[in-house]
Image: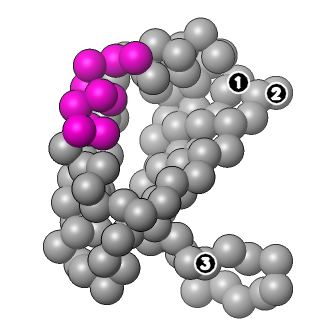
Amino acid sequence: MFIHHVYFWLKNPDSESDKAALVAGLEELKAIEGIKMVHIGFPAATNRDVIERSYAVSWLLVFDDLAAEEVYQVHPMHHAFIAKCAHLWSKVIVYDSEG
């Protein structure tokens, strides 16, 4: 199993329309073949010292393996998403893991 977890910080963190545009762009990516599971998330209302809540949107993908994730990375829909939505975010952090 390969996990690809992306956290997005918006340039305009208070803009609900920017957040909606980012989520709409992510929704389109769900159609890419090889993705086994998708979760679009937002900071939970938990509050402990170890919890990072400053991001706006998280994008969690599950693949069978690294090869499937690499197909996703070069897919034309993924490149189109970046071209269409990159102006919305100020920072992106990716956590990839396998097991």
Name the secondary structure under disc 1: loop
CA–CA distance in space, label 3 to label 1? 26 Å
> Which residue bears the numbered disc 1?
1
Q: Position of residue 68 (x, y in %)?
A: 54, 14
Q: Quadrant of the C terminus?
A: top right
Name the secondary structure under disc 3: loop
Q: Position of residue 79 (x, y in %)?
A: 30, 28
Q: Say which mark, if any, is on residue 53.
A: 3
3 horizontally vs 29: left or right: right
The local crowd at label 3, few if under 14, some if 14 to 19, many if 20 or more residues have their Cα within 10 Å, is some
Q: Are marks 3 and 1 in contact (CB under 8 Å)?
A: no
User: Can you tell which of label 2 and label 3 is closer to the viewer?
Assistant: 3
Q: Amino acid at mark 3?
A: Arg
27 horizontally vs 43: left or right: left
> 70 and 12: which one is in front?
12
> Which residue bears the numbered disc 2?
99
Please say if 23 is above or below 6.
Answer: below
> Magenta span covers which residues?
74-83
Q: Earlier in the sequence, mark 2 or mark 3?
A: 3
